[in-house]
Image (tube, rainbow, N blue to C red):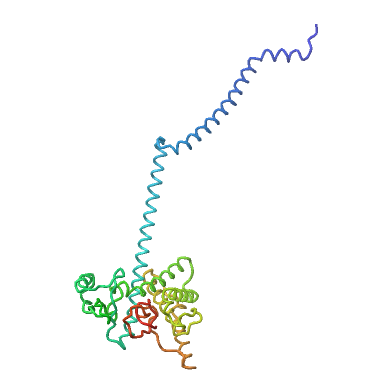
Amino acid sequence: MRQLPHSNCIKGFFLNLPIWVALGLVLNNQFVLADYTQDMEKRADQKILESKHEQNWNKSSHIKYFEDFYTHNKNAIHNLKVIAEKKQLNLLNEMTADLADSMHEKWQNDTRRTKVNRFKPIKVDGKSIDSQSKLDEYLKAIPNEFHNHYKMIDDGKGNVMAQEDILWIPNRHLAPNNKKENNEGAAVAIQFLHRWLKAGHSADQKFLHAASKFVHQEWLERNGGWASEEQKRSFDELEDKEAVKDVRIVEDAFELYSKAQGLALPADLESVSHQVNSELSQKRDRNGSVSSDNSNKHHSDAGSTDGNDSDSGSTKSDGTADSSK
């Protein structure tokens, strides 16, 4: 009997059936193994995530090493930043103290033309020194060369208290209440300059105007209660004799900052004071309406809070002494 053509195919299939079955099992195992492997990895990842929140998680040695290494270096970097910030802060504080000293010294030089002394009450933590023994204790922190500028003085109301002659004592050695305005005025100028430059701006005429304006505004915040009507104007509305005092404080701040940070003083900023003085001279020549008062604007010898001051100063100040600029 004649065989059909496809009978060989059927016969071949059955002859090779074991092979097909074996191949199928292998392929099936591969898929099952892949699924199992993926599932195992997911469960392992989940376990790791869960374990990170458990205190008793046993990390492998290499993970622990790299985490310790990262933490150590992160702390080291943080410590370096803290040290740098402290150094920067110390430098800014030194510049502020130097600027306050300079402001006070300029006031002293101007005032010595008309006065031989200027005693003001000493207050520490808001309290007066009311005995010689307390004054002697206070003077232990003051250089000996200035001791003769301290006295126990009657305030005119029967109250005897320690006073210091601010006309002959450097700002940094003054009592807290007598150097407060100098320190705050200097700090405003230095901090504004530091932040301006740190923000990437140039120290040009725009800076000088912005800084002088800010210095004046901050002074008004502190001393607006006793300031004259002229001084209560905005910076742009001030007469030149007033505005120039703010400008000079900013210029002095920049000179100190430049020396400390190794910066060059810009030519345009360097010439601003000459421009201002030229404008003042021209204005005086035209109508003589501008005073030649070039004294320090921010100083601790103006205002009227002591109650024992009869003289009038010529400087802007912290409001702890005289009744006018």
Q: Is residue 108 above or below residue 289?
A: above
- Residue projecting furthest to the top: 1
Task: From the top left corner, tell me how far across and down residue 52 is, in percent.
Answer: 45, 38
In the depicted view, which residue is nearer to us: 212 or 163?
A: 163
Q: Residue placed at 38% from the left, 60% from the top?
A: 85
The picture quadrant where one finds residue 84 is bottom left
In the depicted view, which residue is nearer to us: 243 or 124?
A: 124
In the depicted view, which residue is nearer to us: 309 or 31?
A: 309
Q: Residue placed at 39% from the left, 80% from the top?
A: 316
Q: Residue placed at 43% from the left, 89% from the top?
A: 291
Q: Residue placed at 23% from the left, 72% from the top?
A: 142
Task: From the top left corner, tell me how far across and down residue 322 is, in percent.
Answer: 35, 82
Task: From the top left corner, tell me how far across and down residue 217 is, in percent.
Answer: 46, 75
Task: From the top left corner, tell me how far across and down residue 181 is, in percent.
Answer: 37, 74
Q: Quadrant of the N terminus?
A: top right
Q: Is residue 10 above or below residue 194?
A: above
